[in-house]
Amino acid sequence: MHGPEGIKLYVNAYRTAFPDIRVTVEDQLAEGEKVVTRWIARGTHLDEFLGLAPTGDTVSVSGIEFDRVSGGKIDEAWVGYHPFATRIADPERIRRGFAAIGEAFPDLRMAEVDSIKEGNKVAFRWLLSGTHLGEFMGIAATGRRIEAMGMDIVRTENGEIVEHWGEFDAIGLLRQAGVIP
């Protein structure tokens, strides 16, 4: 979304489809002109949303947003979210997923784009890029270049990570690789 009108359309689509939507701020960090917010939105799907007929189901979406504030207003925003507001999956499953991505994209690189630290928490935004050179989720190598963004917040104690929250544009990666339309 770009500009105030784009944001208004985006918010209106959610409010129409989920009229009882409630957003809970789970965590927030700030440093200088940067603010990072971790949130969960919950609502009942009562009207069409992105072409999906209403289900009547209560849904939860968790997200992380990086904002740059200028003159008391949000000047830039990056948002990462996914429709599962639960704890992270089995660590072995995650390891296998990363191994599959590494084989399919052997030149995979991750670069930190932004970060802030507040107390014992650090938030960072990063970009992942690589070339689809090996089989990935049943799709033969396409040679396509992909780029996807992610955001993480970690809490440390005595130099060790004790809590982690993360969002990653997996759908964007899958679209660019040709796995989904």
Image (spheres, grey):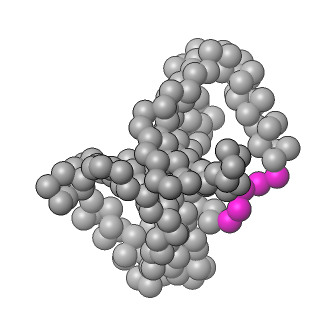
Q: Position of residue 146 (x, y in %)?
A: 52, 26
Q: Position of residue 129 (x, y in %)?
A: 53, 24
Is residue 134 found left or right of 2 in the rendered image?
Answer: right
Q: Quadrant of the C terminus?
A: top right
Say if 104 sits above or below 155 in the image: above
**Residue 88 forms part of the magenta stretch:** yes
- Quadrant hosting residue 74: bottom left
Q: Residue at image x 52%, y 20%?
A: 145
Say if 60 sits above or below 96 in the image: below
Depth check: give the residue in front, 112 or 159: 159
Q: Position of residue 121 (x, y in %)?
A: 54, 53
SS assignment for the magenta stretch, majority: loop
Q: Residue at image x 60%, y 51%?
A: 154
- Quadrant hosting residue 106: top right
The residue sitting at the left extreme is 71
Say if 78 sits above or below 4 in the image: above
Is residue 12 found left or right of 60 in the rendered image?
Answer: left
Depth check: give the residue in front, 12 or 91: 91
Number of disc labels: 0
Q: Look at the image and tell me whether residue 55 can be seen.
A: no
Q: Please state the extent of the stretch shown in magenta in the rendering.
A: 86-90
Q: Residue at image x 63%, y 62%?
A: 84
Q: Residue at image x 56%, y 35%?
A: 173
**Residue 168 forms part of the magenta stretch:** no
The residue sitting at the front extreme is 158
Q: Position of residue 68 (x, y in %)?
A: 29, 49
Say if 93 sits above or below 29 in the image: above
Q: Look at the image and tell me whether residue 108 can be seen.
A: yes
